[in-house]
Amino acid sequence: MTEKVVWDDSYLLGIPEIDSQHKKLLVIANELYEIAAGSPDSYRLKMSAALKKLTDYTVYHFSSEEAFMRSCGYAGTDAHKTAHDNFVREVSFQVQQLSSDNIEDGIRFYAYVANWVLNHIAKADKIWAAAVKAS
């Protein structure tokens, strides 16, 4: 079974508002894990609520991050937005494929979300944050 992700300060960008949002994204992702690893009796209802929360917060965070990059004049904002849009599309697709009773699907989805978020922060977000702070 996949392990729950623990926040590591190496993911900090040094931009408190965005760092806080990244931590919140991982908290929400970890809720997916806890639901899938928890009682099968309440899986369907809890997973549905967690997916809604994840979707809503992801849209909020991506909009906020993109607005921040634009306000700083970051030239790569559009390319970064494309990565965000691709993630949203993939999450939407995977949510549609999730079986409402298959806990293993929930774990796989959690692993996808957690890995994407951490890799995106560690790579793409670190690049724009460094560029913004250097300007």
Image: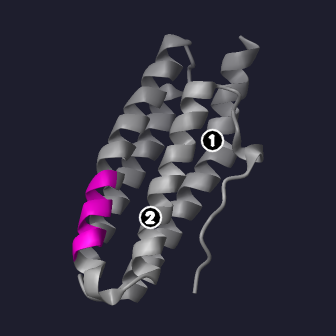
Mark 1 / mark 2, whichever is N-terminal: 2
Q: Residue at x 55, y 26 (%)?
A: 17
Describe the element under mark 2 as helix, strand or loop. Answer: helix
Q: Is residue 76 above or below residue 126?
A: above
Dot 1 alpha-carbon crowd within 10 angstroms: few under 14, some 14 to 19, many 20 or more: few
Q: Label 1 belongs to which residue?
A: 124
Q: Residue at x 32, y 55 (%)?
A: 89
Q: Is residue 47 magenta?
A: yes
Disc number for residue 4: none
Which x, y percent locates residue 108? 46, 78
User: Tag 2: residue type?
Assistant: Glu
Which x, y percent locates residue 36? 41, 79
Q: Which residues are magenta?
A: 45-53
Which x, y percent locates residue 21? 51, 38
User: Tag 1: residue type?
Assistant: Ala
Q: Is residue 57 magenta?
A: no
Q: Label 2 belongs to which residue?
A: 31
